[in-house]
Image: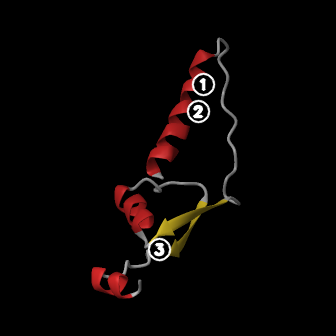
């Protein structure tokens, strides 16, 4: 997730470098924006908070934490041989 954010920011910043005219970027008010982040067992929130990546963000971040998906266990060899 963090890598995707960095890539988008990097691409957006590079696009302004190709313009020939000096312009002042317009300030966009993001105070009413909420970024909803799906978070597997709280790991993304921990990484973003500990890295300081969200410090100074003008927008709010909402983490929707969901538990890890459990895969069904496979029956043992003994159980498989008796079911035939």
| Residue holding disc 2 | 12
Query: Answer yes or no: do the residues labelled 1 and 2 have beta carbons within 8 Å?
Result: yes
**What residue is shown at x 39% (from left), y 56% (from top)?**
52
Could you say which quadrant of the image residue 84 lies in? Answer: bottom left
- Between residue 63 and residue 66, name the one nearer to us: 66
Q: Residue at x 47, y 77 (%)?
A: 67
Q: Secondary structure at mark 2?
A: helix
Q: Which mark is residue 69?
A: 3
Q: Residues within 10 Å of mark 2 (few under 14, many from 20)?
A: few
Residue 18 versus residue 56: which sits nearer the camera? 18
- Residue at image x 43%, y 63%? 44
In this orientation, which residue lies closer to the viewer: 45 or 83?
Answer: 83
Residue 33 figure quarter:
bottom right
Q: Position of residue 27 (x, y in %)?
A: 67, 41
Question: Which mark, residue 15?
Answer: 1
Q: Callout 3 environment at 10 Å: few (<14), some (14 to 19), or many (20+)?
A: few
Q: Give residue 41's position: percent from left, percent from top.
A: 43, 73
Q: Residue at x 54, y 54 (%)?
A: 57
Q: Position of residue 78 (x, y in %)?
A: 28, 85
Give the mark nearer the N terminus: 3 vs 1.
1
The colour mode here is secondary structure
| 72 sits left or right of 23 in the view | left
Nearer to us in this view, 21 or 11 = 11
């Amino acid at each position: 997730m963090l890598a995707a954010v960095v890539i988008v920011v990097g691409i957006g910043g590079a696009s302004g470098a190709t313009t020939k005219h000096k312009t002042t970027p317009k300030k966009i008010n993001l105070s009413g924006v909420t970024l909803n982040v799906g978070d597997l067992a709280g790991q993304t929130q921990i990484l973003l908070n500990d890295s300081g990546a969200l410090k100074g963000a003008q927008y709010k971040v909402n983490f929707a934490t969901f538990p890890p998906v459990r895969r069904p266990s496979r029956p043992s060899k003994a159980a498989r041989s008796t079911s035939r």
